[in-house]
Amino acid sequence: MPRFYGALRWYSVALLLVLLDQYSKNLASAALDYGRPLQVFSWFNLTLQHNTGAAFSFLSDAGGWQRYFFTAVAAVISIGLVIWLYLLPRGQWLLGLSLALILGGALGNLWDRVALGYVVDFISVHYRQYYFPAFNLADSAITVGAGCMLLDSYLQHRQQSAAGEGSA
């Protein structure tokens, strides 16, 4: 039972993220007109978009099969992350955080795909006429989680290298 309680903290982070993601998407869907930018800053707009593809609208015009493909991929990855978090040894807080962020983001977008058939995106950043593809809170969490995972890997490698030098 103690292993479950350790994982419960990370599952709670993921659940909170899903709730915040869904709340922000519902708010954007209710307040914004589809495809019509609402300028917040000169470089930042809120623009409601529906993404039937993957990141950066990859395969969005593929004819519909991609919905089921990306739903299945997200479901399998989410199950893997739930298991990984359950098996994660104590003390690996940065890896736990990264996995929880990725899990929460994956589940937030998975919810959209299953319930709506597309993912709601609404955050748009740009520099002059160069626009980054629209994204959402779930996408941000996945990106930050991946960055945390890379940082954790770097720190673990550095720690192992230092331990190896100390024992030589």
Image (spheres, rainbow, N blue to C red):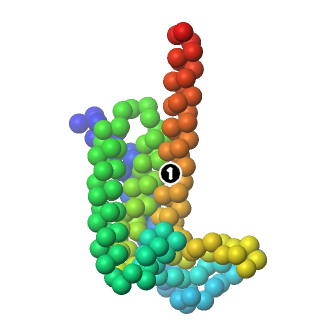
The residue sitting at 53% across, 89% down in the picture is: 34
**Figure check: 152 above or below 166:** below
Q: Pinpoint residue 164: horizontal percent, then vertical percent.
A: 52, 17
Considering only vertical position in the picture, is 2 above or below 117? above
Image position of 151 with respect to 136: above or below? above
Dividing the picture into quarters, in which one does residue 71 lie? Answer: bottom left
The amino acid sitting under disc 1 is Ala
Look at 43% across and 43% down and name the residue there.
96
Quarter of the picture containing the C terminus is top right
Q: Which residue is the site of mark 1? A: 146
- Quick one: 19 or 77, which is closer to the camera? 77
Q: Residues within 10 Å of mark 1 (few under 14, many from 20)?
A: some
Residue 16 shows in the view: no
- Res 132 seen here: yes
At numbered mark 1, what does the secondary structure look like: helix, strand or loop?
Answer: helix
Residue ID at (44%, 71%): 54
Q: How many marks?
A: 1
Residue in front for this viewpoint, 167 or 100? 167
In the rendered image, residue 4, in percent from the top left (x then y), is placed at: 28, 41
User: How far across and down, in percent of the image, does residue 151 sit?
Assistant: 56, 41
Which x, y percent locates residue 167?
52, 10
Q: Is residue 7 left or right of residue 93?
A: left
